[in-house]
Amino acid sequence: MYVAELDRSWLHTPFAGPGMLVTTTEQIEALARSCHYVYVDPQRSAPEALPALDNPTTSVPAPANGSFTAARNTLAEVVQRLADAVQDARHHGRIDLPPLQRAAFSLVNEVLAHQDACLWLIRLNGARGLLYRRSLGTAIHAVVFGRQIGLDHTELGHLALGGLLLDIGKITVPVPILAKPSELNAAERWFVDRHVQQGFSMVRLSDTVDTRVTEMVLGHHERIDGSGYPRRLGGTEIPLFARVAGIVDTFDAITLNRRYAAAMSAHDALRYLNHERGQRFDAALVDEFVHALGVYPTGTRVQLVDGTRGIVCAQNPEWPLRPTVLLTHDKDGERLEPPRLVPAGIGGHIARALDPASPEHEPATLERAIAEQ
């Protein structure tokens, strides 16, 4: 059989790649040591291998059911620790950070092990309450981003903790202001903007917090053109972790429905960031963020050129424009039963990203379908 792609980059394995014809037991054993699964291309495999490839796309785990379970349990635990921290902040004006720090490192380990599953779950299911969902989504995207730019495990833990705490200061903003569907007046805007300073004041009281975490909380609304707040910093005056925080916070925010704006698809959100690269956001970091998530990030609902529709469920760096897609609807809009998995680089090209709020896609149905592949 011809192995066209792996479940990870070829650079992380002993194989030359990309692509290899498997002809020996030794090669299979070597693949098993490096990968959980591989993608086989029937057209490039030997004819005698074809009987075993009658339906090669139906047994590909992307991601596997076990990764969903592990990721869901970890995310639930992180949200519980975050809820405890919010209660501390409301009642005492400070946060008991060690439990949340431990949860942040658990989140790092989970994202490193099951990145696509974590991104899938946060895109489709979220968490209780917008504050918790935003905190969790920002932290996950920050870890994915940090992994891309080569940060070590400790640094990723600081990124995750900073992501969880970015908006902790919003607990001081009156609920009617946060829920207001129309444009804020000057006084209301002042209350919202001061959440940065309020959050910074809470977080820095901890003796165990790293400086980079407080930099994220204080600087995630700064912009490299100097148009941000609260200190109007510009360029590299903004610490690296704060520049990372500004990108992931913006991305996560605009991919969710808010009181004043409908959600963008993750693909369109990346296009927005790319449009602002070098102006409001660090150009080199935006490039790395796009590489980290893929052109069509996991969880993006897409339409292929043949009219079929589905959802991106796994990335492959070798084919950034052709990730693994779970097809859920045929070209006439009829639901596919069962859904069909198209491995990265093997199937059709993506024509466009779809509205993330499309009603025909039920998160639970999609998760169940991919888990059964």
Image: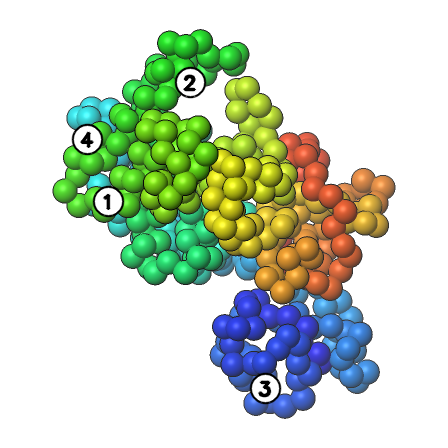
Going 52% across and 12% down the picture, which residue do you hit?
Answer: 182
The answer to whether one can see residue 111 in this image is no
Of callouts 3 and 2, which one flags the residue occurring earlier in the amino acid sequence?
3
Going 63% across and 90% down the picture, which residue do you hit?
Answer: 24
CA gap between label 3 and label 4 equals 56 Å
Residue at the spot of label 2? 178
Of callouts 2 and 4, which one flags the residue occurring earlier in the amino acid sequence?
4
CA gap between label 3 and label 2 equals 58 Å
Residue 207 in picture, x, y percent from top left? 14, 42
Q: Secondary structure at mark 3?
A: helix
Residue type pointed to by label 4: Arg
Residue type pointed to by label 1: Thr
Between 86 and 48, which is closer to the camera in this rendering? Answer: 86
Q: Secondary structure at mark 4?
A: loop
Q: How packed is label 4: few (under 14 Cα within 10 Å), some, or many (20 or more)? A: some
Between 245 and 367, which is closer to the camera in this rendering? Answer: 245
Residue at the spot of label 4? 94
Residue type pointed to by label 2: Leu
Of callouts 3 and 4, which one flags the residue occurring earlier in the amino acid sequence?
3
In this rendering, the answer to whether 88 lies above or below 247 is above
Q: Secondary structure at mark 1?
A: helix
- Which-is-in-front pick, marks 4 and 1? 1
CA gap between label 1 and label 3 equals 47 Å
Residue 40 in picture, x, y percent from top left? 69, 73
CA gap between label 4 and label 1 equals 16 Å
